[in-house]
Image (tube, helix red, strand yellow):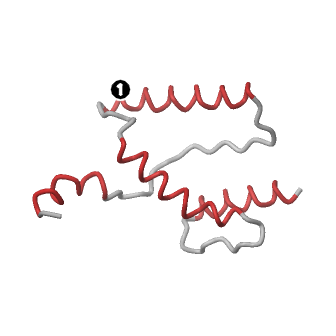
């Protein structure tokens, strides 16, 4: 990749992290709860984009989310150990999920 192309995309590929997130854990997912979650998420992202004057639904963020999820998904198996390199929030969410799944 050329130096010019790297300079062009670097801001989309480097993420500082340590940003606030919202997490909802549901015991049951049905059409109503899923629809409510999707509507809530879309509205939240839309409003943040308006406030920050950014395009919230950029493809770079979507791609990063896929990469991060692929790394965490195997850890959701009850037999797998949670990666100690995750931040405390991520480790706690994985452990809460595992406890709920075990019951």
Residue drawn at x 46%, y 32% is 45
Label 1, on which residue?
50
Tell me which residue sits at (50%, 30%) in the image. Answer: 44
Of residues 34 and 90, the one drawn nearer to the viewer in this rendering: 34
Of residues 21 and 28, the one drawn nearer to the viewer in this rendering: 28
Determine which quarter of the picture holds residue 48: top left
Badge 1 crowding class, 10 Å Cα cut-off, few under 14, some 14 to 19, many 20 or more, is few
Figure quadrant of the N terminus: bottom left
Q: Is residue 8 left or right of residue 40?
A: left
On screen, residue 57 above or below 103: above
Q: Is residue 57 above or below residue 101?
A: above
Count of marks placed on residues: 1
Find the residue positioned furthest to the left.
4
Residue 23 x/y as whole percent: 62, 45
Q: Position of residue 8 (x, y in %)?
A: 17, 52
Which image quarter: residue 26?
A: top right
- Secondary structure of residue under mark 1: helix
* 49 relative to 39 in the view: left or right: left
Point 38% across, 35% down: residue: 56
> Eyeballing the image, is 12 above or below 3?
above
- Left or right of 36 on screen, residue 22: left
Q: Residue furthest front?
A: 1
Image position, residue 10 (x, y; %):
23, 57
Q: Quadrant of the C terminus?
A: bottom right
What residue lies at 80% left-to-right and 39% top-to-bottom? 28
Relative depth, front residue between 25 and 13: 13
Q: Position of residue 76 (x, y in %)?
A: 69, 62
């Amino acid at each position: 990749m050329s130096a010019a192309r790297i300079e062009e995309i670097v801001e989309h590929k480097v993420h500082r992290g340590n940003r606030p997130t919202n997490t909802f854990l549901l015991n049951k997912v049905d059409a109503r709860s899923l629809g409510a979650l999707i509507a809530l998420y879309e509205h939240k992202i839309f409003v943040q984009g308006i406030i920050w004057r950014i395009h919230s639904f950029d493809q770079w963020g979507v791609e990063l989310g896929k990469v991060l999820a692929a790394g965490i998904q195997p850890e959701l198996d009850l037999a797998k150990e949670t990666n100690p390199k995750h931040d405390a929030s991520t480790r706690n969410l994985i452990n809460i999920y595992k406890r709920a799944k075990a019951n």
